[in-house]
Image: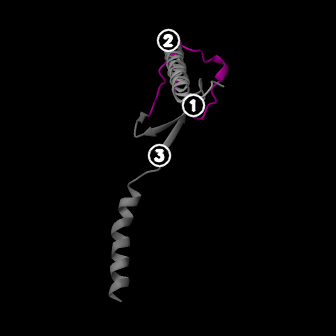
């Protein structure tokens, strides 16, 4: 009996707290068709680096995106670093081949 009374009392105390939290409302921008969440009187606007609105409710046209100069520079640097790494691997493999050949000569075996 005490548990039921305690549970009913907690429910009565918690009900006003739930009633004070209104459902968040949304607003749709007529120009961009983006849906924004309204918190009180303010909108939760977000923008991308290029200044366009960041909204998941509108599909972005991927064909309009271009590679920036910075992206191109990073790509060129990565390719150049890869070329250097491949050159290092070739040199190491050539050195290993020469060492194996020298070891065969020392052991008196003919080269294959």
Q: Position of residue 72 (x, y in %)?
A: 53, 12
How far apart in space, not on screen, are marks 2 and 1 (Cα)? 33 Å
Q: Nearer the viewer, mark 1 or mark 3?
A: 1
Q: Residues within 10 Å of mark 1 (few under 14, many from 20)?
A: some
**Residue marked by disc 1:** 34
Q: Are marks 3 and 2 in contact (CB under 8 Å)?
A: no
Residue 44: which disc? Answer: none
Quarter of the image that includes the N terminus? bottom left
Q: Is residue 7 magenta?
A: no
Q: Position of residue 103 (x, y in %)?
A: 51, 27
> What residue span does the magenta drawing correspond to?
44-73
Q: Secondary structure at mark 2?
A: helix
Q: Position of residue 54 (x, y in %)?
A: 52, 28
76 lies above or below 108:
above
Q: Position of residue 66 (x, y in %)?
A: 59, 15
The answer to whether residue 6 is left or right of residue 104 is left
Q: Secondary structure at mark 1?
A: loop
Mark toward the start of the polypeptide (3 vs 2): 3
**Residue marked by disc 2:** 73
Say which residue appears at 49% left-offset and 43% top-offset: 25
Q: Is residue 65 magenta?
A: yes
How far apart in space, not on screen, are marks 3 and 2 (Cα)? 44 Å
The answer to whether residue 44 is left or right of residue 63 is left
């Amino acid at each position: 009996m005490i548990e039921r009374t305690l549970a009913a009392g907690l429910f009565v105390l918690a009900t006003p707290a739930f009633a004070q939290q209104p459902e968040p409302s949304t607003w749709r921008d007529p120009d961009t068709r983006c849906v924004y969440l309204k918190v009180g009187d303010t909108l939760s606007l977000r923008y991308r680096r290029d200044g366009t609105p960041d909204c998941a409710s509108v599909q972005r046209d991927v064909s309009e995106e271009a590679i920036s100069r910075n992206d191109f520079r990073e790509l060129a640097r990565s390719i150049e670093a890869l070329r250097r790494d491949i050159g290092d691997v070739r040199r190491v493999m050539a050195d290993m081949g020469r060492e194996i050949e020298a070891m065969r000569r020392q052991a008196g075996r003919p080269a294959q």
